[in-house]
Image (tube, rainbow, N blue to C red):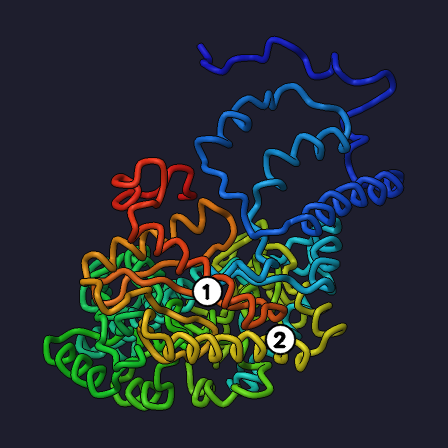
Amino acid sequence: MSTLQKPEHDSADHRQAGEHPADALLTGTSTGQYLSENLLGMSAVSRSIASANRPFTGMHPRNLAPAIDAVDLDQPLGTTGAALEELQPLYLRDAVYFHHPAYAAHLNCPVAIPALVGETILSAVNSSMDTWDQSAGATLIERRLLRWTADRLGLGSAASGVFTSGGTTSNLQALLIARNRAVAALRRDALLRDGAGQASARQDSAGASTAQGRSERLPELLGRLRIFASEVSHFSIRKSAALLGLGEDAVHLVECDADRRLKPDALRNALAESRGRGEVPMAIVATAGTTDFGSIDPLLECATLSSEFGSWLHVDAAYGGGLLTSLKYRSRLSGIGAADSVTVDYHKTFFQPVSSSAVLVRDAAELRHILHYSDYLNPEDAADPQIPNQVDHSIQTTRRFDALKLWLTLRVTGADGIGAMLDSAIDLARETGRLLEADPDFEVAARVQLSTVVFRFRPRHLDEDTSDTLNRWIRSALAASGNAVIAATTVDGRAYLKFTLLNPTATLADIERILELIRSYAAQWLSGQAGPNAAGARTETPAGAAA
């Protein structure tokens, strides 16, 4: 017997006479409704953004959850206006607004208006970016943008790629290609050792080989593969290793210098020691813009070592990729063109709405390592180089036409316009760093390199443990107030605060106001006046603080 419960009422009973569920669909006869109801949504967002006098209300999940849980999703309201009115206290009122200059927490940016127009178009047309017969025109626009990005990266004329949902997916796809490439090489070597090097072989999409002689299964080969990345590389590198069957311990974390950049000598030593153990250097991952420090690894040195040790070189430029448009700091990506693959997140430093990322490869032929043919989608016997199917380049099947947002931004604002906005954010971070370095009450963890500033409030009389507790409390208290939203991290085992500055309209005066709030909260905590229960407030997250 089924355990599914039928709602006590039939939603059909609540429709007005003459209405039909399909009336809610966008068709050739409902375009007027489409326009008017979208205007209602745009008006609601415009009012919320215009009235937001701080980045956050400080709402705690326990206070908001009951109202959302109380919504009866089997009881429709019947009109978009009513649904938007209900949405105001459930979402828009307490949303975190990244456009506000007092938001300085994560890699979230205000978004370009042309990109929002693109979002409206792509959602309505609803192209699926897997095969040409679902995305005519859209496929070519995506490919043109990938070509534009590859040219700016200096990857060469053979480069290709695909848009993805974000940097984690882009990194995973790049490392999947590197893994399958390495496995294919191990199998070829095994065949040669077995005297079957002249046998007829067929490469499948996972790099497998069938031939006379021995062919080891994938699990038997993965144990030797290793990835090398800096100790401050993105967590998705280790997560990808786990998803690819290597395990997180297959990632060698390489020591960094004082600027949190990977040390080439340490990388060379790690590679040599690994090879001495009989391991295979599947990939080197260099980071161009670490999440905490914005640090950019020495890309040219990494490329030299990848060539010497026969390793795939992937550059995670999810954060720093926006430097491709920079008018002042573009040279910081020098050497990136030698990479075998690159991740770029347009929804970070290109001011695009989430989601919009890409993974690019220097040689389009390497995409064969993820190619899979399906009879109902992209059958092998119908493959035609004149008919582009982006699913051939992707680990995703259904994908949105997110490239349209960047396309419209470039056609309206231009690459230089994007670069000028990013330069403004980097300039502000540099000014903020100098301001903090000159203040004896603050300590900066590393030289400012992109648009992040890692620091802590630590007057000289505070010991390390007290400083840790204080800085954690400051961050929580700020979030609970909603007056500013900043990030936190750990550096060498100690608690630090972090500004992530991606708002071109923010000024140094805005940062100074946040610093004054930090001083004010610190003074309350140090004086024991941090809340109704001062003793508890000095050691715990303040009541009402955001998670």
Provide the residue designation for mark 1: 170
Q: In which quarter of the image is residue 228?
A: bottom left
Q: Quadrant of the N terminus?
A: top left
Q: Nearer the viewer, mark 1 or mark 2?
A: 2
Percent across and percent down for residue 104 are 49, 61
Front-lying residue, 489 or 440: 440
**Rendered view: 116 above or below 321:** above
Q: How many marks?
A: 2
**Rendered view: 406 above or below 541:** below
**Rendered view: 63 above or below 500:** above
Give the residue drawn at x 77%, y 36%.
25
| Gap between marks 1 and 2 measured at Cα | 25 Å
Q: Quadrant of the C terminus?
A: top left
Percent across and percent down for residue 480 are 45, 44
Mark 2 element type: helix
Give the residue drawn at x 51%, y 85%.
155
Give the residue drawn at x 89%, y 39%.
29
Q: In this view, does 34 lie to the left or right of 300?
A: right
Q: Quadrant of residue 535?
A: top left
Provide the residue designation for mark 2: 421
Front-lying residue, 364 or 311: 311
Viewer can see residue 358: no
Task: Kindly identify the amino acid type of the residue bearing the numbered disc 2.
Answer: Met
| Mark 1 vs 2, N-terminal side | 1
- The residue positioned farthest toward the left in the image shown: 277
Mark 1 element type: helix
